[in-house]
Image (cartoon, helix red, strand yellow):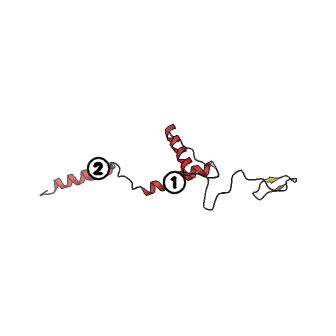
């Protein structure tokens, strides 16, 4: 048995190799399996985003990838909101206050 251009076995009566199940990815693209769990409402919002952002993509995987890329670009453009203080920040401020109380003339 011969092998086709992708290394798959080919029967002697086959004139050409097997057709790939999925189109080839562009350069510098990578495909990975990803399992995600979230609420039904969030899934519905993601599906709506996929329909809006990924118009014309060849496969569902590429459509989801386009939606995730859109979200990542949007997240990078938005300035992060300062979150609550870390407990170490609180401890540091507490120590500074204690030191100021111990200094003469404070």
Given residues 9 and 61, the one toward you in this image is 61
How far apart marks 1 and 2 lie (CA) works out to 36 Å
Horizontal relation, residue 88 to residue 13: left or right: left
x 82%, y 56%: residue: 16
Q: Pointer 2: what residue?
A: 90
The residue carrying pointer 1 sits among few (fewer than 14), some (14 to 19) or many (20 or more) residues within 10 Å by Cα, namely: some
x 28%, y 53%: residue: 92
> Which residue, as the protein is rendered here, is positioned at the far top?
40
Image mark for residue 3: none
Query: x, y (%) of residue 49?
Result: 52, 47
Image mark for residue 70: 1
* SS under mark 1: helix
> Which residue, as the protein is rendered here, is positioned at the far left?
105
Q: Nearer the viewer, mark 1 or mark 2?
A: 1
* SS under mark 2: helix
Query: x, y (%) of residue 10?
Result: 82, 53
């Amino acid at each position: 048995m011969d092998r086709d251009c992708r290394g798959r076995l080919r029967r002697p009566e086959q004139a050409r190799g097997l057709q790939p199940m999925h189109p080839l990815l562009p350069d510098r693209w990578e495909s990975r399996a990803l399992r995600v769990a979230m609420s039904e409402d969030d899934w519905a919002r993601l599906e709506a985003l996929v329909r809006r952002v990924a118009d014309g993509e060849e496969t569902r995987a590429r459509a989801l990838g386009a939606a995730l890329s859109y979200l990542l670009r949007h997240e990078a453009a938005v300035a992060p909101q300062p979150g609550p203080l870390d407990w170490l920040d609180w401890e540091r401020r507490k120590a500074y206050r204690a030191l100021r109380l111990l200094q003469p003339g404070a």
